Image (cartoon, rainbow, N blue to C red):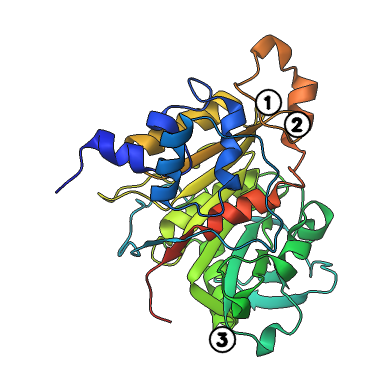
Amino acid sequence: MPRSPRARCALIALALAACSTPSSELDGGDLMGVFDHKDASVDAASEAGAKDAGRIKDASAPPPSAPAPSATPRAPTEGSCVAAEGLPDTEIKRTLGRPACRSSDVLEWKDANGAPRYACVVSPPGVETRAPLPLVVYFHAEDEDPSGVDKRTGLRKLAARFDMTGDPAHTGFIVLAPQGRRLRAGKAGNAFDDDYTGEDNVDLATVDHFVAALDARNLVDKRRVYALGSRKGGHMAATYAMMRADRVAAFATYGADAPRASWTCPGPPPPALFVYRACDQIAPCDSVERWIRAREAISAETLGLRLGAANGEEPSCALNKKCTAIVGTANHHRWPKGREEDIMRFLARHTLTVRQ
């Protein structure tokens, strides 16, 4: 029997009670509870919420060796679900060379414009002899390059030991970190062209090429491909996930509001986790939460994890008069190091029903 919109909303995972915007009705202390459930299936989350009246006890997050959360499989979305908008950004200000990613494989390619492209690959030891592993495509922020995986995040350590599948043969995951371009106009720093949503987007094609290169080596579990982006890289992570909804199971962003890409298919876009600051001058808290509400309106599974200046949850967006330009800019640039396990637990809850 078809469910009513209210019933579907109630079944959206991750304790967004009644699909409310985080700053309106949901206490920030409840957000972390969704990551504390070892079985984070939709039914388990609903049952826990009913028993505990929406309040989750303040418990320590499980260690990376804890059992993987139950995954929610999703059928891949066929066809294009993002309308072509904008114009390609092709004028290169400076050609970027090979990134200095320590203890990583570096993939090389030339895109359709003839520009050299690179990506760093962080993988667990002995990956070539392992069963195919989950893949996280990490889009760096505009003032970084792929080496930001090590300089800013704790993803390398997690990649070696985090259990995303519950299968000992699949412990760990691979991080693919493509490098952006230094464009002359329209973008700052090392950017990805997320404002152009045509299928001939060279950044989109570059990521496709590098993912295919890893898949050709039998390294990628195609059911578990994810996108993750920091700040402006979050726009590209969301864009890539929506434009490749037949390949990406879920995505997560930090410090990013909605990208230009808009979803056009009848069904919902891939599940998403948005990690953001209560005080952020670049990606304002209320702007991120408008994106959350827009996704909820089309029944897209969405979780907002709102943080303070450090890494603790905040119950609401900061008041404008308390969020100064200096503080809000500093917060925006502060990657939430130490919360990567929360991100990976969310992503691990989602898989695609595709053939291997």
In the image, 253 versus 16, the foreground residue is 16
User: Which residue is drawn at the image coordinates 56% and 77% (left, top)?
Assistant: 220
Q: Nearer the viewer, residue 115 or 355?
A: 355
Identity of the residue drawn at 49% across and 51% down: 40
The amino acid marked with disc number 3 is Asn
Task: Name the quadrant of the C terminus.
Answer: bottom left
Q: Which mark is residue 218?
A: 3
Would you identify the image quadrant in which residue 139 lies?
A: bottom right
Residue of label 2 = 331
Q: Secondary structure at mark 3?
A: loop
Viewer-side label of 1, 2 = 2
Vertical order, 179 against 261 (above or below): below
Residue 263 visible within the image: yes
Residue displayed at 38% across by 30% down: 18
Q: State which quadrant residue 331 falls in.
A: top right
Binning the other alpha carbons within 10 Å of mark 1 as few (below 14), some (14 to 19) or many (20 upward) gives many
Q: CA distance from mark 2 to mark 3?
A: 39 Å
Label 1 with label 2: CB-CB less than 8 Å: yes
How many callouts does the rendering have? 3
Marks 1 and 2, how far apart at CA: 8 Å
Name the amino acid, label 2.
Answer: Asn
